[in-house]
Amino acid sequence: MAVPALTADSDKLAALLAHLDHATALLAAAPAFTKPGKLPRVLDTARRVMLQPGGCAAVAARAQAIDEAGVFAGSDWATPQILIPSLTPHSLGSADANIVVIEALSELRLLAVAHEEYRHPLISAEQAHHYLTQVIAINLNLLFGPATEAERETQGRLAQLPRNLFQYLTERIGYEHVIDQLIDEIWRILEQRPIQVDAVKSMITQIASCQANPEIDLGASGQGANRLVSAIFSPTRGCQEDPGIAVYRERLVSMDPSALQSEATGFARAMHDTGLVSPYHPVLLRFLLDQGEHLLAEALGLSATGRDCLLCYRDLVQALIRACVHPPTAQAVYGLALLLERGILYQASMAPALLRQLALRLSDWSQARLTLAFGDTVSPRARLLEGVLCMLGQPLGVGQGNNPTCQSARALSMWAYSDPDYLLQMVAWAARDDEIIMHFEGQPISSRESTGGVATSLPLDLDPVSLLVVPQLDRIYAEMGRRCIGREGDPHRWVNPEFHGWWSGRGFRINVDVTTGHLSDLDAFLRHFYASYHPYYNGQLPLIHPQPAGIAVTDSAARFIGWHAISLLRVSIDPTDVMRVYFYNPNNDSGQDWGDGIRVSTSGNGERSGESSLPLEEFASRLYIFHYDPLERGELAEVAQEELDRVIARIHRSWGADRIPATELQASEGPLG
């Protein structure tokens, strides 16, 4: 009896696929201005196909044709290289069928790219595979759980489509491989110590659910997850079976000093091991406020520097804990610990600035923004204070989210790193006044009066500080750029020092002609870079403050993707005696493959938490803008031409391939004929 049903399903699928192919062809042939009218038929037919047995596989085989027909044109999905995995649950859970279908089509397209069945111009096979691994991990519930009542109410039968999709994705990628790769990926991300860890915690929660589900056979995979799962749900003996916040609070009351000491040590060890804070940790910390500084310092995992800072500013630290350390804001514990370890409270202005932050009255707009982004489980003021502590403790953990605001993220990182009281002033202005005023060449610029920043919409996928400050900074940065219109050369020359701070060098070099886009005087550009930053050519002068720089980002095939803002942090010999550049990248994940053998490292080569690094020659081959102090320039002539030639060859093989001036091409090819 099963055979006729199977045949009927196959016939139905074949008929739907014929309709899908026809609709795709019509969309591909349509002029751009009529494509929106042709798109609904493609999406509706694709939805019906993917709800059929074998439908996802059939659509995957047509992924390239569907993409090239223009299904994603004009949408966020048109640029797959900047898609963020953590946003997929929202798209796949939407009540709008078109959004669900477009998201599903995007995943199937990337699956084709990952298996090298489709060579996409904007994303490599490695990037696509990496993205899908994260997407599957974040949506593991769609693999094993039936549709919830809420999903059935909002999506109806459509709720089955994401489940069909992930069953197929997992079959192609391999579930065991996904779990093990996911665990490795989580550790790789955590080594960078980002401020925003909600996506990572979500992945770990899904892994824990799989481990606890007797119906799921992980085989030999997932064995490395225990440290991650325990760091969140059971880091100490007192909460080893994840009893719940209320039960754990009751247990603390009956613990003797030795047990409390053990709890404090266990929480601190798990926190500093992973960079993640268990929701139980704030419960202990608040309980210890009345138990003396020794146990408090132990629970924060402080060294001698941090302990001294805690003792000197005991009342302030206790006020910060009472104001913002709660289970929903658990990461504030890690931020506070690292803030104390940095010793920045010894700067005369920091304690008063933090006291102002504690008493700050947030504007209605700021409260609404914070509530919209993070919910109302704690007050907006506590949420913002958590963000402040994390940014001050982890200045290299600031991320730009899925937004083209790398300049603003870099500025926040620089200020948290070099001028933390200035950062707190920016936070006060933005959160209280809904306005920031900065000066450009002596003239004030108001964020309220400036319009049209780089970001086209208000971002929500940011940490609490960035959520309020970045929109203001973005408009100011754009206005500074507008005030440079008509000047010769690149506006970064004037904007960066005014925007980022006095420590930004007034000397400026760029290796691209702004008018033509061609490479310009690479030899002189590189000699200035080596003479300014390479210890062998600048008199062993270390880099004192982070310096703004710009890189030409390339994919794993060494193809140009775009320009990107970073900070130069230091240049020194790594443990293997290789001269490396250590830099800050605000793009949320600094470990990348830039092609031509260039893989950005985030650990294992002398990096500190949050740093990226590359051998100096490799880094120089992606650098296109840097600042320097013209009064401290090193020896230009001493840089070996052979070394510069290797760097120039890398540029010509990658992002500079289409930017070589015709005169240089002719010279390199020799006389014609």
Image (cartoon, rainbow, N blue to C red):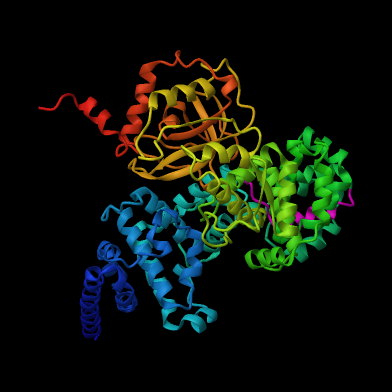
Residue 661, placed above or below residue 147: above
Residue 116 visible at all:
yes
128 on left or right of 298: left
Q: Quadrant of residue 372?
A: bottom right
* Residue 662 in the image, given as x and y percentages of width and height: 25, 33
The residue sitting at 72% across, 41% down in the picture is: 420
Residue 91, placed above or below residue 111: below
The residue sitting at 73% across, 67% down in the picture is: 364
Image quadrant containing the N terminus? bottom left
In the image, residue 365 lies in the stretch drawn in magenta = no
> For this rendering, which residue is in front, 325 or 403?
403
The residue sitting at 28% across, 64% down in the picture is: 63
* Residue 399 in the image, given as x and y percentages of width and height: 57, 49
Residue that extends furthest to the front in the rendered view of this protein:
486
* Residue 144 in the image, given as x and y percentages of width and height: 46, 69
203 on left or right of 296: left
**What range of the chain is rendered magenta?**
273-291
Image quadrant containing the C terminus? top left
* Residue 440 in the image, given as x and y percentages of width and height: 63, 43
379 on left or right of 571: right
Residue 267 visible at all:
no
> For this rendering, which residue is in front, 316 or 443?
443
Residue that extends furthest to the top in the rendered view of this protein:
638
